[in-house]
Image (cartoon, rainbow, N blue to C red):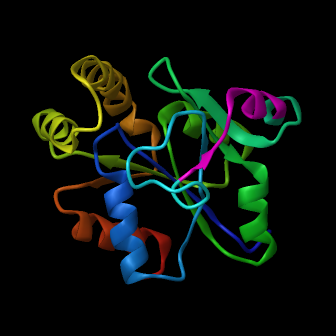
């Protein structure tokens, strides 16, 4: 575990965290991405155990009680998301570095319990681009888009809390910047 590094990637909803991580994994297939747990329903095309660990509210509660999460939070006032300790420990036991995609509240929890992690903020070029991306993916209704844009204001204001900021103009370029920060490029 001492030789493994945890990278924490944070950014507002719609910034392209998933897209950038896919580009990073395509270029560096050996890279380990931690799979988060969530209580939200799968979106079309998402698979349990690959995109997320989809959990019932009851199972999520059990894991909280068992200290099974490195971090967890209620996001957008609705679904809960968390990082299973077992997910990180599985990779660390094999000496692997791990990158984790989470929200601001989760990153703040990890900073308290695991400050040696490397914290990276993925930022949109500007707020207008972020709004276009959120609306363009068509996965949320108008009320949810508005809620996510409001949350994004707080998240963007917190970018200064992070050691590194990567601007996602193009996913492939952002992936190259991440790879350089991680020392795998």
Q: Which residue: 61% across, 58% down?
A: 49
Q: Position of residue 41 (x, y in %)?
A: 51, 36
* Closer-to-camera residue (9/41): 41
Asked whether 74 falls inside the magenta stretch, the response is: no
Q: Position of residue 34 (x, y in %)?
A: 60, 59
* Closer-to-camera residue (159/85): 85
Q: Which residue: 52% across, 56% down?
A: 47
Q: Tell me the quadrant of the picture where the C terminus can be found.
A: bottom left
Horizontally, residue 95 falls left or right of residue 36, namely: right
* Closer-to-camera residue (154/151): 151
In the displayed structure, would residue 20 be above or below residue 134?
Answer: below
Q: Which residue: 56% across, 51% down?
A: 52
Q: Residue furthest front?
A: 44
Q: Which residue: 77% across, 34% down?
A: 59
Q: Tell me the quadrant of the picture where the N terminus can be found.
A: bottom right
The stretch of residues the image draws in magenta is 52-62
Q: Residue furthest right?
A: 66
Q: Position of residue 101 (x, y in %)?
A: 50, 51
Q: Position of residue 148 (x, y in %)?
A: 32, 26
Q: Place residue 74 in its image quadrant.
A: top right
């Amino acid at each position: 575990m001492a030789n493994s590094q945890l990278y924490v990637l944070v950014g507002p909803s719609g910034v392209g965290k998933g897209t950038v991580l896919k580009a990073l994994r395509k270029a560096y297939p050996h890279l380990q991405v931690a799979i988060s747990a969530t209580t939200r329903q799968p979106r079309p095309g998402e698979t349990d155990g690959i995109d997320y660990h989809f959990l019932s509210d009851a199972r999520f509660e059990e894991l909280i009680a068992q200290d099974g999460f490195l971090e967890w939070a209620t996001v957008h006032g609705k679904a809960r998301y968390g990082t299973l300790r077992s997910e990180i420990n599985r990779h660390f036991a094999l000496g692997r570095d791990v990158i984790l995609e989470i929200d601001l509240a989760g990153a703040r929890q990890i900073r308290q319990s695991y400050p040696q992690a490397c914290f990276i903020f993925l930022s949109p070029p500007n707020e207008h681009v972020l709004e276009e991306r959120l609306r363009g993916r068509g996965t949320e209704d108008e009320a949810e888009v508005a809620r996510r844009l409001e949350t994004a204001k707080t998240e963007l204001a917190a970018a200064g809390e992070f050691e590194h900021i990567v601007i996602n103009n193009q996913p492939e370029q952002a992936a190259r910047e991440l790879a350089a920060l991680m020392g795998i490029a």
